[in-house]
Image (spheres, grey):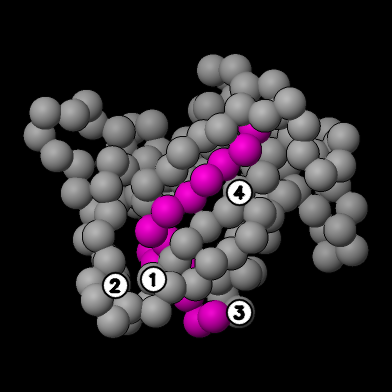
Amino acid sequence: MSHTIVNPDGLHNPVPFGYSHTAAVPAGTDLVFISGQYGSDAEGSVVSTDFAKQVEQAFGNLGVALAAHGLDFSHVVQLRTYVVGLDFAKLGAIGGAVQGGGANPPTNTVIGVAGLAMPEILFEVEAVAARS
């Protein structure tokens, strides 16, 4: 891992919710910025109207983007997730997807939005990954 995750004492344990409070990247580390990935197939069509399926596909697409740089989810330092019509039921699907990062998930900010680039998109995730 080319970065350090820290969940400081004095703050709640965020790991069960699928994120961490802080991440540090050492000087000299290459950063890879990945634009928003949504639940699309290879042609750009949304795969489902189901929120959880869109989350699953978006993270799958993120995995493809990471692999294009020789990286995987263990290299992800920060996520930003955008959710149309944010409610607590949707947070579980996001946390479950991020939990794939193991015991030290990346930092993640969940942002509720009125809409995304196309009306059928319900979820989008962007990432910053670190490579030493």
State the residue position of label 4: 125
Q: Residue furthest front?
A: 27
Q: Which mark is residue 39?
A: none
Would you say the residues marked 4 and 3 are in contact, meaning their CB atoms lie under 8 Å apart?
Answer: no
Residue 41: x %, y % from top left:
83, 58
Marks 2 and 4, how far apart at CA: 21 Å
Q: How much space separates mark 3 and mark 1, taking CA atoms?
A: 14 Å
Whichever of callouts 3 and 1 sits on the residue coming sooner in the sequence is: 3
Q: Could you say whether the residue bearing mark 3 is in a helix, strand or loop?
A: loop
Q: Image quadrant for the C terminus?
A: bottom left
Q: Nearer the viewer, mark 4 or mark 3?
A: 4
Give the labeled residue for mark 3: 68
Residue at which label 1 appears: 130
Q: CA distance from mark 1 to mark 2?
A: 6 Å
User: Which quadrant would residue 86 be assigned to in this image?
Assistant: top right
Asked if residue 53 lies in the magenta stretch, the reply is no
